[in-house]
Image: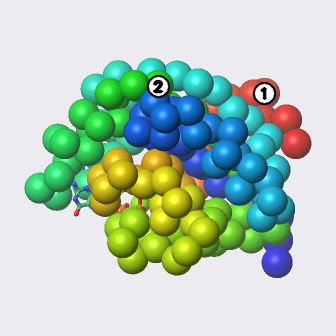
Amino acid sequence: MATERTLSIIKPDATRRNLTGRINALFEEAGLRIVAQKRIRLSDLQAGAFYEVHKERPFYASLVSSMTAGPVVVQVLEGEGAILKNRSVMGATDPKKAEPNTVRAQFAESIEANSVHGSDSPENAAAEIAFFFAGTEILP
Ligand code: GDP
Ligand code: MG
C-alpha cells in the first residue's frame, strides 16, 4: 500500500477536555506520523466552507457552531494507507457504533461532538490538506 496523507482535525469538544495528547498518541501508535499541526480557531465562514458538502443536512448549522465553539488542532497525518487507517483509529461517526478503543468510542461526547474529523478519500484528503496548509508547512 502506498504512503498517503490525510487531514485530521481534533475538534473543540476534545481540545476543551485537554485530550490532544491522548488522541495524538493513538495516531502515532497506529503508525501515523504527524507531519504538520497547528492549533487555530475556525471562523463561521471557514467551518461553513469546510463542511459545505453537508450544507443541506439538518445538522449543518449545529455542526458549524460546534466546530467554532473553541480551538481545533488541524493536522496532516502520513503513513501507509493513512486515509483508511485514520478512519479506523477514529471509529464510526456515531460513538455508540464505534469499535472499542477507537478515538470516538473512548472520547466522543455525541454523534456531533465526536472529537475528530478525518478525510474519507484521496480526493478529499488533498483538498482538505490544501484548505489548511501550505506545502512548506508540511515536514515529513
Ligand atoms: P464523519 O466523516 O465520520 O466525520 O461523518 P460525516 O462526514 O457523515 O459527518 C460530518 C460530521 O457531522 C460528523 O463528524 C459529526 O460531527 C456531524 N454529524 C454527522 N451526522 C450527524 C447527525 O446525525 N447529527 C448531528 N447533530 N451531527 C452529525
Ligand atoms: Mg466525513
Q: CA distance from mark 1 to mark 2?
A: 23 Å
The quadrant where residue 18 appears: top right
Neighbour class for label 2 at 10 Å: few (<14), some, many (≥20)?
some
Q: Amino acid at mark 2?
A: Pro
> In the image, what residue occupies the spot 49% across and 35% down?
17
Who's the residue at 52% across and 60% down the image?
106
Q: Residues within 10 Å of mark 1 (few under 14, many from 20)?
A: few
Q: Which mark is residue 71?
A: 2
Seen in the image, is 138 located left or right of residue 95? right
Secondary structure at numbered mark 1: helix
Q: Quadrant of ligand 2?
A: bottom left
The outermost residue toward the right is: 140
Task: Mark 1 and mark 2 in contact? Answer it, CB < 8 Å.
Answer: no
Relative to 15, is 139 on the left or the right? right
Residue type, mark 1 in image: Thr
Quadrant housing residue 6: bottom right
Taking the image as drawn, is residue 37 in sight?
A: yes
Q: Is mark 1 within 8 Å of ligand 2?
A: no
Give the image location of residue 86, x and y in percent. 64, 63
Residue 75 location in percent, x, y? 65, 39
At horizontal 46% and vertical 48% (from top left) the residue drawn is 115
Give the quadrant of the C terminus: top right
